[in-house]
Each structure stands twice: as C-alpha cells, then as structure tokens.
Image (spheres, rainbow, N blue to C red):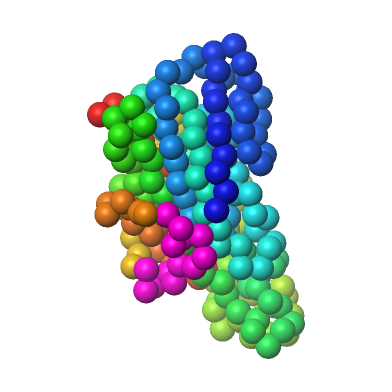
C-alpha cells in the first residue's frame, strides 16, 4: 500500500504521486484522505486535476495494491475515476498463449474521509454513475481461441469530451453495480485498509467483459 500527499495550494502547483499534473489549482481549505483498491488500476481526478494514479503499472502481474492519499479541496466535490482491469490487447483477454489464457475480472472500492470532521463522507456504491468505454470479448466463446485478437469482438469508445468536469451531465450513465467480496475475490492491498461499512466493491454490470470504466461521484457539503 502506498501513501501519497497531494496539496492543492492557492499559489502553488499540485504536489502528487505518480502522474500528477500542474494545472492551475484553486484555493482550498479542507483536508481529505482518500483510500482505494483496484483490480487492477485506477486514477482519480477533480476536474482536470489528477489527484492520484495507481502507483503499480497495470501490466504488473497481480497488481492488486491499495492507495492511501491526501488532498485539499472545497465542497462540493465531483470525483472522476478511470478504472481499468488488465487486458493484454483489445480482445479483452489476459495470459494469451498460456494455459491460463482467460477473461480477467475487475473490482474497485473507495472511501473518502473529511479530516476536519473526522469521518467518512463518500464511499463507492450504487449511487455512482459509470460508463464502459472498453468491453470485450463480446463473444465469450472466443476466450480459449489461439488467436483471440482475430476472433474476439469488442466495443471501444473514446472518453466523452469534458466528462471529468463538475457540470458534465452523467444522468444517462448507468448506476454502478455493487458486488460482494466473494464475487470479486479481493486480494493483497485490499486487506490493509479498514473499510467503512458503507464502502462497496463496485464495477459495471459485467465483471469480465467490462475492462475500462469511467465513474463519477458527487460529494455535497455535510
């Protein structure tokens, strides 16, 4: 598990872990701690500002780490996430050419603590809105084919313009699907964090076919 500190200073730049950007931070006064676990990778944004990126590359086998990170911001917050399950190519499969060639499955969990209040103010759950932009294979029967890139069908879309911005209309996006730990099988870094009872493992409607998700969550002032 990696801990990252992000300070969005009024006259400074964002100091962040992997993949941070310097993009005109706004004055802020409240301090938050975020914690997330992903199978396999995620990045979180506030508007166009990357707050944190998973510190373990998605290509790392068994990249089931958790991240704990801090940042300053003001309510209301609109959190935007890119969440990915590993896929070797657009077939959606992993371990291609090996005996364990298969469709991977995903999973994600998140909680946000307001340090001034001393309590959790946001958790991953079915209230989140998510959109799939990479789904494959659409024909699951191709999963054991020797050249799945030729036989597996996929649905691939670009990220919608402006989807990270607070004013973006995500009302047509699907609600996230909540899953049990038994369904996701969380590993490694998941067990290093004491998850709030309201935090749920989420994904979209198919843990195997849906490989890249965009998710959004609004956090109103308590």
**Where's residue 165, x and y in %?**
49, 30
- Write down the quadrant of residue 43 in the picture: top right
Q: Is residue 107 above or below residue 196?
A: below
Left or right: 200 as drawn, with respect to 88: left
Q: Quadrant of the C terminus?
A: top left
Please check the rendered image and state whether residue 188 is part of the magenta-colored stretch, yes or no.
yes
Q: Is residue 192 visible?
A: yes
- Write down the quadrant of residue 216 in the picture: top left
Task: Look at the image and give the residue range highlighted in magenta.
Answer: 181-193
**Where's residue 100, x and y in %?**
64, 84
Q: Report the predominant secondary structure element of the magenta stretch.
A: helix
Q: Is residue 25 above or below residue 200?
A: above
In the depicted view, which residue is nearer to us: 110 or 205?
Answer: 110
**Where's residue 23, x and y in %?**
63, 23
Residue drawn at x 36%, y 24% is 75
Left or right: 180 as drawn, with respect to 142: left
């Amino acid at each position: 598990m990696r801990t990252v500190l992000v300070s969005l200073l009024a006259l400074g730049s964002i100091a962040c872990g992997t993949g941070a950007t310097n993009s005109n931070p706004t004055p802020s006064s409240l301090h938050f701690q975020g914690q997330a676990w992903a199978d396999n990778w995620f990045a979180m944004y506030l508007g166009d500002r990357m707050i944190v990126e998973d510190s373990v590359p998605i290509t790392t086998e068994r990249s089931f780490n958790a991240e704990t990170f801090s940042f300053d911001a003001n309510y209301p917050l609109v959190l935007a996430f890119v969440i990915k399950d590993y896929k070797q190519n657009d077939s959606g499969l992993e371990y291609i050419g090996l005996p364990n060639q298969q469709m991977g499955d995903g999973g994600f969990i998140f909680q946000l603590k307001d340090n001034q209040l001393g309590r959790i103010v946001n958790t991953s759950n079915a209230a989140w809105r998510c959109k799939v932009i990479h789904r494959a294979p659409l024909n699951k029967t191709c999963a054991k084919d020797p050249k799945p890139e030729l036989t597996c069908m996929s649905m691939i879309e670009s990220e919608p313009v402006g989807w990270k911005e607070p004013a973006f209309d995500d009302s047509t996006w699907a609600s996230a699907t909540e899953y049990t730990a038994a369904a996701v099988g969380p590993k490694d870094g998941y067990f290093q964090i004491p998850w709030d009872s309201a935090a749920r493992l989420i994904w979209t409607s198919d843990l195997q076919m849906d490989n890249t998700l965009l998710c959004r969550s609004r956090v109103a002032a308590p």
